[in-house]
Image (cartoon, rainbow, N blue to C red):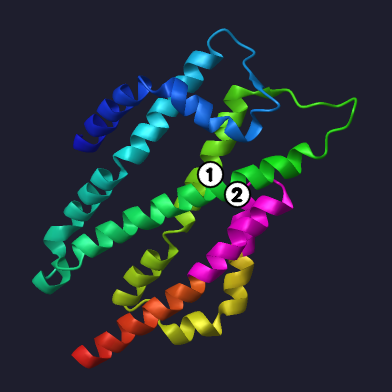
Amino acid sequence: IHSFVAALLATILCWFWSGDLLDLLIRPIRDQGVYFTAPNEAFLTRLKISAVVGLFVVAPFIFFKIYGFILPGLYKSERRVVTPLLLATTALFYTGVAFAFLVVIPQVITFLLSFGTDVMEPLIGVGPYFNFVARLCLAFGLVFELPLLVLFLSVLGIVNPRMLLRTWRIAIIIIVAMSAMLTPPDVISQVMMAGPVLVLYLGSVLVSIVVTSRRKKDD
């Protein structure tokens, strides 16, 4: 309930800057321009932008509530890592969103619009364009949490470095397939997601090595 109330208040506050947020959103396609084809589409798009940005703003609070839910079941020594984990969760999520918005989306837009011709020009609706951007940003924000997922699985003893290294071929197939499902059907966005995720997978192996070595010392 607290998370819902926080997201609602953030949405209301973001509404007052929804015009500026919309200008920022359409910057990659400013030269082509965007259009709305229904009387309420512009209003609904600004409302969606307010809700999504508001949710991003209160994401640390939501993550804190999630960790607070599982905190009572942890040992005292395990509770000490909650704050670093909370910071890491938030930082990785925001890094993924920023990477998608600042790096991936401009490249993908340029690539996709290059298929136009002199007789076939783009007519981009603001609603579908917002859905396109929001989906990519959310997808990148989530996949950038991979090291934390591996960290939890390593702490629980479900995975270990040897397993991660032995199954690297399967991991590549899964990463490529996941990138194809989470991104639009174009090569650029799929490659730009698969590349960082592969790097994160290697980083996850290092995280698992550290966690596993500490567990062995404790034992």
* Residue 197 image point, x, y percent: 54, 64
Q: Is residue 208 left or right of residue 73?
A: right
Identity of the residue drawn at 38% across and 65% down: 149
Q: Residue furthest left?
A: 76
Mark 1: amino acid: Phe
Rendered image quadrant of residue 215: bottom left
What residue is shown with label 2? 104
Q: Nearer the viewer, residue 146 or 129?
A: 129
Q: CA distance from mark 2 to mark 1?
A: 6 Å
Quadrant that contains the N terminus: top left
Label 2 crowd (10 A; few <14 / some 14-19 / many >=20): many
**Is the residue marked by circle 1 packed among few (<14), some (14-19), or many (20+) residues within 10 Å?**
some
What residue is at 52 percent from the left and 26 percent from the top?
23
Q: Is residue 184 visible?
A: no
The answer to which of 148 and 102 lies nearer the viewer is: 102
Nearest to the observer: residue 13 or residue 38? 13
Residue at the image position 81 percent from the left and 26 percent from the top = 121
Outermost residue, front side: 31
- Amino acid on which disc 2 is placed: Val
Q: Main secondary structure of the magenta part?
A: helix
Relative placement, left or right, of 12 versus 204 is left
Secondary structure, mark 1, is: helix
Rendered-image quadrant of the C terminus: bottom left
Which of the 4 image quarters holds residue 54?
top left
Find the magenta span and give its range: 176-200
- Which residue occupies 51% across, 48% down? 139
Asked if residue 92 lies left or right of residue 176, the reply is: left
Please tell me the numbered disc located at residue 101.
Answer: 1
